[in-house]
Amino acid sequence: SGAPGDGSLFTISSPNGLLSSQNGDIIIAADEMTFSNATSISAGSGSVILTAVSPGRNIEVGTVAAGNLSLLDSELDRIVTTNVLIIGDANAGTVQFSNGDIQANNVADLTVVSGAQILTSAAARLIEDDTLTLDAATGISGNSGVTADKFAVDASSSSLAARTRTSGDIRIQELDNLATGTSNGLESNFSGIQTAANGDIELEVRGGSFTV
């Protein structure tokens, strides 16, 4: 038998697929999730948290990957909050953004938390216009394609807080206008870009500006 939660599936389907908290937090924990086109997850000014149940399970954002918690870009658009969408937690495996431009259009801030690495893959880039928080245990970078070895962010007048908690480097490629700021949605928030255990920081500006 598998570990508790292994293979668990959470589904929101139309026509009754509505979660509304009236400004409270909405937390969904499952190893697989599916949100149909007509559904809505609305937290008002509350936070929305999406994470796996099984420790170490990888999270794939932008495409479906067998054995991972997969979240499509279109599914992120079903989430509405004036606060923060949090993907992952400290027990999650690698969180990878893949397959084109990825943006949660109806949330204010986006926070990504991993117990391993946070990556962009292939031609992927993460788009965020408010506060973006990247909180990884062992590194933030890209691993292939157009982003090469850097995590690709396309941000218009937004702020970034990024850190590694135990080891690893931070390598970020900025494609619009970005400035460092303070994280949102963590038990203990932090500011700026920070690495642990002698990790390197590499920042590449491809367009616009990057202000620290």
Image: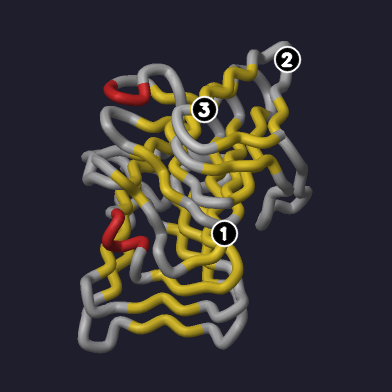
Residue 206 position within the rendered picture, expressed as x and y whole percent measured from the top left = 45, 28
**Which residue was labeled with disc 3?**
205
Q: Are marks 1 and 2 in contact (CB under 8 Å)?
A: no
Q: For numbered disc 2, what is the local secondary structure? A: loop
Q: Are marks 3 and 2 in contact (CB under 8 Å)?
A: no
Q: For numbered disc 1, what is the local secondary structure? A: strand
Residue 198 position within the rendered picture, expressed as x and y whole percent measured from the top left = 72, 11
Residue 178 position within the rendered picture, expressed as x and y whole percent measured from the top left = 58, 42
Query: 10 Å neighbourhood of mark 1: few (<14), some, or many (≥20)?
Result: many
Residue 49 position within the rendered picture, expressed as x and y whole percent measured from the top left = 52, 61
Q: Is residue 93 visible?
A: no
Query: 10 Å neighbourhood of mark 3: few (<14), some, or many (≥20)?
Result: some
User: In which quadrant of the rendered view does residue 39 lie?
Assistant: bottom left
**Which residue was labeled with disc 2?**
197
42 left or right of 14?
right
Check the image and name the residue furthest to the front.
208
Image height of 194 relative to 63, above or below: above
Q: CA distance from mark 1 to mark 2?
A: 28 Å
Q: CA distance from mark 3 to mark 2?
A: 25 Å
Image height of 158 relative to 209, above or below: below
